[in-house]
């Protein structure tokens, strides 16, 4: 998928506000699903074990190499203006402010007059709110997990960045084959929520624009206060807040700066936000060995692939047209 196709999907994602059948149909129409996805890996004890077990671990966005990955852009200046507007009008006999808080009564379950008195007696500290919003940004980054893929098995940038300068390997998954997906097929899966929340892969959109996720940050801050016992939000408010930020986690996860566009990334986002690192099980169709991989490490990767039941082993090489290519590995 080129960036034009990625932009088309991104624009449809921006319009997506619910998960009704029609909405999902429109979103899928803007998402030509890839027939294959690949993942680039260095050779290590951990990656060999994951290959052998057909496991893919989700990674926290907080530890990605790009500090702006899954970064919530917050309109602090806009919040300050709203804060000033409310403060400037609290001491006035302003029916607009009173009507505004009366409108919120059914979902906040707080009497409008009582809320105005509370705000007068305990003015909101803007500096503390700003600090809390920035802190919630970090919390969200730490709790949003995903797995990164690419359609292009010959992506030179990723062979350099994530396959240890061509010394690693690539795993290629057939996304049209139901046998690729192993979650939910074992007895142990009955106890695993991951088996029932099958994640979907989406294309990353590369742009210099910033996605304004202020509402998401505020809602997540309110949820955190609710969970800590500092607030008692009504069920109606919780329901409306959830609906208001539906698909926000996907939006902040699927836009990256233009300088990363050569990664040609697809991202599988974990449905649940939680700090624990989890995994899914997917069986690769084949393994591609890196151009500069030492022979003893090739044997280790081939051995792990065979344990995993992967029969297709290919090698990366430079063909007669001076281009990267792959060929079947000969047994030695």
Image (cartoon, grey):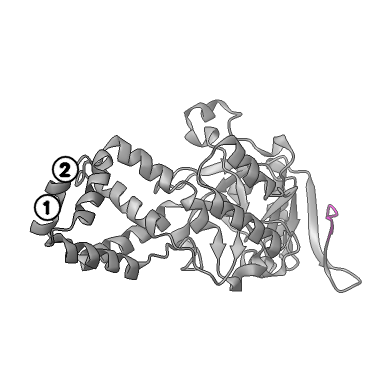
Residue 125: % across, % down: 18, 64
Instruction: Answer with mark 1 or mark 2, whichever residue precedes in sequence.
Output: 2
Which range is magenta?
326-332
Q: Which residue is drawn at 34% across and 51% down?
A: 219
Residue 87: % across, % down: 18, 64
Q: Mark 1 points at which residue?
A: 118
Q: What element carries label 1?
A: helix
Quarter the N terminus occupies: bottom right
Residue 163: % across, % down: 65, 64
190 above or below 150?
above
Quarter the C terminus occupies: bottom right
Q: Mark 2 points at which residue?
A: 111
282 above or below 156?
above
Marks 1 and 2 sit apart, C-alpha to C-alpha, by 10 Å
**Horizontal side, residue 39 vs residue 143: left or right:** right
Quadrant assignment, res 88: bottom left
268 above or below 120?
above
Q: Which residue is drawn at 37% across and 41% down?
A: 240
Residue 45 drawn in magenta? no
Residue 329 drawn in magenta? yes
**Horizontal side, residue 245 vs residue 4: left or right:** left
């Amino acid at each position: 998928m080129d960036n034009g196709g990625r932009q088309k999907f991104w624009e449809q994602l921006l319009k997506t506000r619910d998960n009704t059948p029609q909405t999902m149909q429109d979103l899928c129409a803007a998402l030509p699903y890839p027939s294959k996805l690949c993942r680039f890996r260095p050779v290590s004890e951990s990656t060999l074990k994951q290959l052998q077990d057909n496991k893919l671990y989700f990674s926290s966005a907080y530890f990605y190499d790009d500090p702006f990955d899954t970064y919530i852009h917050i309109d602090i200046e806009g919040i300050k203006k709203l804060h000033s507007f409310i403060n400037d009008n609290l001491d006035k006999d302003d029916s607009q402010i009173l009507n505004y808080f009366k409108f919120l009564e059914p979902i906040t379950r707080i009497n409008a007059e009582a809320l105005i008195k509370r705000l007068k007696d305990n003015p909101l500290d803007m500096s503390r709110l700003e600090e809390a919003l920035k802190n919630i940004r970090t919390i969200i980054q730490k709790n949003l997990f995903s797995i990164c893929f690419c359609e292009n098995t010959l992506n030179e940038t990723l062979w350099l960045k994530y396959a240890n300068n061509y010394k690693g390997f690539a795993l290629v998954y057939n996304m049209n084959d139901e046998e690729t997906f192993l979650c939910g097929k074992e007895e142990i899966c009955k106890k695993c929520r991951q088996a029932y929340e099958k994640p979907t892969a989406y294309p990353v959109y590369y742009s210099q624009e910033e996605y304004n996720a202020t509402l998401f940050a505020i809602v997540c801050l309110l949820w955190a206060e609710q969970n800590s016992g500092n607030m008692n939000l009504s069920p109606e408010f919780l329901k409306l807040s959830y609906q208001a930020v539906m698909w926000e986690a996907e939006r902040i996860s699927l836009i990256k700066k233009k300088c990363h566009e050569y990664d040609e990334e697809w991202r599988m986002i974990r449905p649940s936000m939680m700090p624990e690192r989890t995994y899914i099980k997917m069986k690769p169709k084949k393994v591609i060995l890196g151009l500069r991989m030492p022979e003893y490490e090739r044997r280790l990767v081939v051995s792990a692939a065979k344990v995993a039941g992967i029969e297709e082993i290919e090698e990366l090489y430079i063909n007669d047209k001076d281009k990267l290519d792959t060929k079947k590995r000969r047994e030695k």
